[in-house]
Image (cartoon, grey):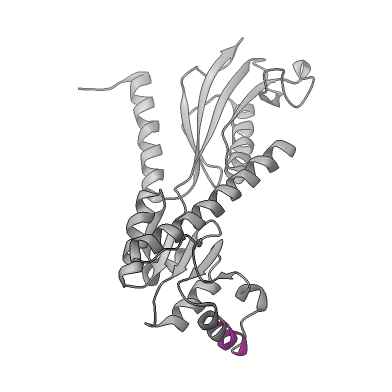
Amino acid sequence: MVVRGKDHARTGQFDHIQTLKQAGAPFCVATVLRTADATSAKAGAKAAITQDGEILGHLGGACVMRAVRTAAAEALAQGGPRVIRVKPSDKVVGLTDPDGAQIFKSGCPSGGTVDLLIEPCRLPPRLIVFGAGPIARALREHGQMAGFRACEGEDTIAEAEPRDFVVVATQGQGDGAALKAALESPAARVSMVASRRKARVLTDKLQAAGMEPARLARLKSPAGLDIGAVDPHEIAVSILSELIQWRNARATEVTQDERTA
């Protein structure tokens, strides 16, 4: 089957979106919802916007493209979708319209109005687990089901981001090296399956070796909520419960920041 015209263009945009998803980098999808008056944008058109501001697809003229780049950057930073409206400057009376659409002024000669939905697309945070024992294995298994990208610590700690979580569950097998790598990463939270006493001994050594107190203070040990967990799967559930609590609290903070911005 040969796909032509609009169908071919739309298929191309879905290919861009799939490629970006596979790459793992955050991006946005912009969809034209409606248009009014003269505009080159067409309802239903889609484009992918990379985190660097590259627009893969056609959404309209230069004024629309500028607005989309700005809105996409904001959506990625704040984590939520938004509807924007690009319309002639002489018709703009505020930052938002009564229906809640975010307004961008257009100086393009066409004089048209374009409504677009901007949706941020980010992979879920990583759950980076150090260790090869029963607790580490159970944590990766349950973490995957809970919506994290669960992975091996040694393989992925160098790729950690501020929104990721690290758990050291080495249990006597390279504890110091794993904890050092975890605390040196930019991950949002670092936990360790260990007693408070053991964690204190390890952090004292790291401090003596020159690690900054601010990094050491990020450690939560023992990892997990106190639910009376005993076996490895119960311990994994207690740790995941704490991580989910942190993750959801962070999402709430971002939403509140967006509302008050």
Count of numbered tags: 0
Quarter the N terminus occupies? top left
Q: From this viewpoint, is residue 261 visible?
A: no
Residue 137 left/right relative to 53: left
User: Picture coordinates of residue 188 (x, y %)?
Assistant: 56, 61
Query: Which quarter shows the C terminus?
Result: top right
Q: Residue at x 31, y 69 (%)?
A: 134
Which image quadrant for residue 65? top right
In the image, residue 200 lies in the stretch drawn in magenta:
no
Percent across and percent down for residue 121 are 48, 41
Name the residue rendered at 71%, 23% in the picture: 107
Q: Please, is residue 35 above or below residue 124 in the view?
A: above
Residue 98 can be seen in this image = yes
Q: Position of residue 159 (x, y in %)?
A: 45, 64
Q: Is residue 132 above or below residue 227?
A: below
User: Residue at the spot x=50%, y=52% of the render?
Assistant: 244
Q: Which residues are magenta?
A: 203-208
Residue at the farthest left position: 1
Q: What main secondary structure does the magenta stretch of the protein show?
A: helix
What residue is drawn where x is 62% and y is 73%? 215
x, y percent for residue 83: 60, 26
